[in-house]
Amino acid sequence: MKHHIILRIGAKLLIPPIMLFALYVQFHGDYGPGGGFQAGVIFASAFILYGLVFGLAELRRVAPLAVVTKLMAAGWLIYIGVGYAGLILGGKFLDYNVLSHDPVSGQHLGIFLVELGVGVTVASTMLAIYQCFAAHQSRELADDEW
Amino acid sequence: MVTDIDFILAHYNYWAAMLLMAAGFYIVVSRGNLIKKVAGLNMFQVSVFMLYISMGKVTGGTAPILTGKPEIFSNPLPHVLILTAIVVGVATTAIGLALIVRIKEAYGTIEEDEILVIDRTLEQQDAHGQ
Amino acid sequence: MIIRLRNLFAVVMLSSVFSLLSAGLFVALDAVDVAFTEAAVGAGITTVLFLGALALTGSIEKPQQGHPYAALLVMAALAAMLLYGTMDMPPFGDAGAPIHRHVVPEYITGTQTQIGIPNMVSAILASYRGFDTLGETGVIFTAGTGVLLLLRRRLSSRQQSGGGDAE
């Protein structure tokens, strides 16, 4: 699809706002609809759009599968780490009240970190799954076959 | 009692969800193409979501986001359940589709009856070979 | 329509439209978080995955041979049982239904006093029911790992020189 200039220009214009919107949804998930899952999916869809328009090799250059798989695990480890931090600091597993100087701000910090972990895992998993499906093609479709 | 208009108005959301469930189930059971079965499963899932969310709605309520004014909220607990369920649904769909791609590579077809035929001939060849 | 169409591409597109419409329905039912997720996930990611799978397999379904009478009978029986089961359910929108009584008032007041964030769904998801979200993140991770295991293979040699192998 590299030769379709409208698609290229449109994608170039759209991908940064999509990523920005994903970050907005992630961090404002406390104040309005949103949160980790939605933000992760939207962020992955920005990368998938890039991969669809510019080709899988470009996507691999920007987000290599080795990095994406490590991010998948890292997101879940952040979540588990918050749980263990609760244990280490004296409370129960996944107890957010002990994470900070008073319970309410502890809850805020806990929810922020947990949603971050979830968002990272979801985004990298969706990206990894897309790359697997796209890379499994036994031959690339030539441009004149569209 | 069933034709009472109040009864119908009080239950039509459940009936709509049940009809969608039956349609999704029918796709899974009757069609042989594996991808269509997965699409039918997705339809079944969406109908279950509709059932739960409609159970959580309160008439006169609003979205469960605190605004500082006292008001009636719709029940947020089914929303949380369904949020988890949606993401688990996409996870199972992804694995199901990956399995279908591998089945196509191994058997050469994704129609269920042809796969059964190939399986049976392979079993018979195994039995004769031993 | 989804039931009878044989062109699978059309089936996938109709499923995507169905997901989008159900997201609109969720907004009408005051479930904004769920609508957001369903629109992003159902109408977005699922469609991309289906199209990817269709590109790797065929896109026309084989014509149905004979009428599936047994399947119709089972579906009718299932629908009858399900409809019978909904007869005793609480009325739609009733504020006094049991679902609204047990734990939810405590969650709603607790979100205001103990947690202090406006979005109740995020508060319940991350704090009150945090274990569920932990397991769910694990499910997503497992699904990603499963797809990686199933679909990773050495690319054909023509592509291997260009793109490099997936590790």
Image (cartoon, coloured by chain):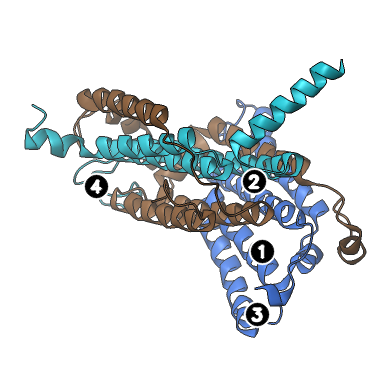
Q: Residue at x 31, y 32 (%)?
A: C105
Eye-nearest disc, 1 or 3: 3
Is residue B32 rendered to the left or right of residue B10? right
- The local secondary structure at tag 4 comes to loop
* Nearer to me, B48 or A14: B48
Give the CA separation, mark 1 to mark 3. Answer: 14 Å
Question: Which residue is identified by label 4?
Answer: B70
Q: Do the residues at pointers 1 and 3 share their chain?
A: yes
Q: Residue at x 77, y 61 (%)?
A: A63
Eye-nearest disc, 1 or 2: 1
* Nearer to me, A146 or A98: A146
- Chain letter for blue, please: A
- The residue furthest bottom is A5
Give the CA separation, mark 3 to mark 2. Answer: 32 Å
- Chain letter for cyan, please: B
- The local secondary structure at tag 2 comes to helix
Looking at the image, do the residues carrying marks 4 and 2 touch, with CB atoms under 8 Å apart? no
Number of residues whose C-alpha sits closer than 10 Å to that of mark 1, classed few (under 14), some (14–19) or many (20 or more): many
Residue B56 shows up from this direction: no
Q: Quadrant of the N terminus of chain B?
A: top left
Label at residue A117: 2
Q: Earlier in the sequence, mark 3 or mark 2?
A: 3
Q: Residue at x 60, y 25 (%)?
A: A92
Q: Earlier in the sequence, mark 1 or mark 3?
A: 3
Instruction: Give the colour chain C carries in the figure.
Output: brown
Against A16, residue C54 (above or below) is above
Give the CA separation, mark 4 to mark 2. Answer: 33 Å
Q: Earlier in the sequence, mark 1 or mark 2?
A: 1
